[in-house]
Protein backbone atom coordinates (compact mmCIF):
# COMPACT_ATOMS: atom_id res chain seq x y z
CA UNK A 1 0.00 0.00 0.00
CA UNK A 2 1.39 3.39 -0.91
CA UNK A 3 1.97 6.20 1.56
CA UNK A 4 -0.92 8.25 0.18
CA UNK A 5 -3.41 5.46 0.76
CA UNK A 6 -2.16 4.93 4.32
CA UNK A 7 -2.67 8.59 5.27
CA UNK A 8 -6.08 8.58 3.60
CA UNK A 9 -7.06 5.51 5.58
CA UNK A 10 -5.77 7.16 8.77
CA UNK A 11 -7.84 10.28 8.00
CA UNK A 12 -10.95 8.16 7.51
CA UNK A 13 -10.42 6.25 10.75
CA UNK A 14 -9.77 9.48 12.67
CA UNK A 15 -12.87 11.08 11.13
CA UNK A 16 -15.05 8.18 12.25
CA UNK A 17 -13.59 8.14 15.77
CA UNK A 18 -13.79 11.92 16.14
CA UNK A 19 -17.34 11.90 14.81
CA UNK A 20 -18.30 9.41 17.51
CA UNK A 21 -16.56 11.56 20.15
CA UNK A 22 -18.33 14.69 18.89
CA UNK A 23 -21.65 12.83 18.83
CA UNK A 24 -21.22 11.74 22.45
CA UNK A 25 -20.18 15.25 23.46
CA UNK A 26 -23.21 16.73 21.66
CA UNK A 27 -25.55 14.35 23.45
CA UNK A 28 -23.96 15.25 26.79
CA UNK A 29 -24.33 18.92 25.98
CA UNK A 30 -28.00 18.28 25.24
CA UNK A 31 -28.32 17.41 28.94
CA UNK A 32 -26.32 20.53 30.01
CA UNK A 33 -23.12 18.60 30.72
CA UNK A 34 -20.31 20.29 28.80
CA UNK A 35 -16.64 21.17 29.02
CA UNK A 36 -16.92 24.83 28.12
CA UNK A 37 -18.90 27.27 30.27
CA UNK A 38 -20.99 28.44 27.33
CA UNK A 39 -23.32 26.62 24.99
CA UNK A 40 -26.06 27.35 22.50
CA UNK A 41 -28.67 25.25 24.26
CA UNK A 42 -30.55 22.38 22.70
CA UNK A 43 -30.45 23.95 19.24
CA UNK A 44 -26.65 23.99 19.26
CA UNK A 45 -26.64 20.41 20.51
CA UNK A 46 -28.93 19.26 17.71
CA UNK A 47 -26.78 21.03 15.13
CA UNK A 48 -23.73 19.36 16.70
CA UNK A 49 -25.42 15.95 16.43
CA UNK A 50 -26.21 16.54 12.75
CA UNK A 51 -22.63 17.68 12.05
CA UNK A 52 -21.26 14.63 13.88
CA UNK A 53 -23.37 12.28 11.80
CA UNK A 54 -22.17 14.01 8.62
CA UNK A 55 -18.57 13.60 9.79
CA UNK A 56 -19.08 9.89 10.45
CA UNK A 57 -20.58 9.43 6.98
CA UNK A 58 -17.65 11.35 5.42
CA UNK A 59 -15.30 8.97 7.19
CA UNK A 60 -17.16 5.95 5.87
CA UNK A 61 -17.65 7.25 2.33
CA UNK A 62 -15.25 10.15 1.57
CA UNK A 63 -15.70 12.48 -1.36
CA UNK A 64 -13.10 14.54 -3.22
CA UNK A 65 -13.18 17.55 -0.86
CA UNK A 66 -13.46 15.63 2.41
CA UNK A 67 -10.54 17.38 4.23
CA UNK A 68 -11.99 20.82 3.48
CA UNK A 69 -15.46 19.82 4.65
CA UNK A 70 -14.01 18.20 7.78
CA UNK A 71 -12.08 21.40 8.53
CA UNK A 72 -15.17 23.58 8.21
CA UNK A 73 -17.24 21.23 10.36
CA UNK A 74 -14.44 21.00 12.95
CA UNK A 75 -14.27 24.77 13.37
CA UNK A 76 -18.07 24.91 13.47
CA UNK A 77 -18.16 22.30 16.23
CA UNK A 78 -15.57 24.21 18.27
CA UNK A 79 -17.75 27.32 17.97
CA UNK A 80 -20.74 25.26 19.16
CA UNK A 81 -18.73 24.35 22.33
CA UNK A 82 -18.04 20.76 21.26
CA UNK A 83 -14.35 21.12 21.99
CA UNK A 84 -12.72 17.69 22.08
CA UNK A 85 -14.52 16.37 19.00
CA UNK A 86 -13.74 19.55 17.06
CA UNK A 87 -10.03 19.42 17.85
CA UNK A 88 -9.71 15.77 16.85
CA UNK A 89 -11.61 16.51 13.62
CA UNK A 90 -9.14 19.30 12.86
CA UNK A 91 -6.30 16.81 13.37
CA UNK A 92 -7.99 14.45 10.91
CA UNK A 93 -8.30 17.38 8.50
CA UNK A 94 -4.58 18.09 8.76
CA UNK A 95 -3.73 14.45 8.08
CA UNK A 96 -6.13 14.37 5.13
CA UNK A 97 -4.70 17.59 3.74
CA UNK A 98 -1.26 16.00 3.59
CA UNK A 99 -2.50 13.70 0.83
Image (cartoon, rainbow, N blue to C red):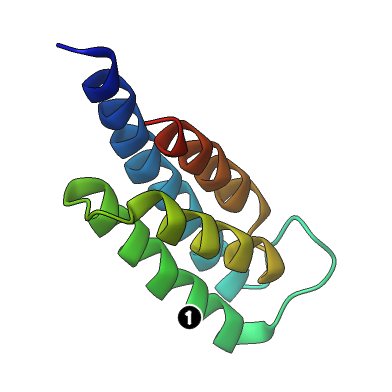
Q: Is residue 88 left or right of residue 95?
A: right
- The residue lying furthest to the bottom in this view is 43
Residue at (45% x, 44% y) in the render: 18
Instruction: State the image coordinates of residue 28 (x, y, percent, origin top left).
Output: 56, 63
- Seen at 79% across and 60% down, the residue is 36
Q: Work out which quarter of the rendered image holds the C terminus and state it.
A: top left
Q: Position of residue 85 (x, y in %)?
A: 55, 49
Q: Residues within 10 Å of mark 1 (few under 14, many from 20)?
A: some
Vertical comparison of 26 with 5: above or below: below
Label 1 element class: helix
Q: Nearer the viewer, residue 25 or 9?
A: 9
Q: Nearer the viewer, residue 99 or 58?
A: 99
Residue in the picture at 45% in, 38% down: 97
Say which quarter of the image contains residue 39: bottom right
Residue 59: horizontal and vertical position, in percent? 27, 47
Task: From the viewer's side, name the closer residue of 54 and 25.
Answer: 54
| Picture quadrant of residue 3 | top left
Residue 2's x, y, as percent?
Answer: 20, 13
Residue shown at 28% from the left, 22% from the top: 4
Q: Is residue 73 above or below residue 87?
A: below
Which residue lies under the disc numbered 1? 46
**Could you tell me which quadrant the N terminus lies in?**
top left
In the picture, measured across the screen, residue 14 lies left or right of residue 87, that is left
Please determine whether, in this image, residue 89 is positioned above or below residue 94. below
Amino acid sequence: MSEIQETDKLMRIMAIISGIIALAESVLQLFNIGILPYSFGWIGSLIGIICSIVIIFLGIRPIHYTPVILGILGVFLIILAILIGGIVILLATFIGALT
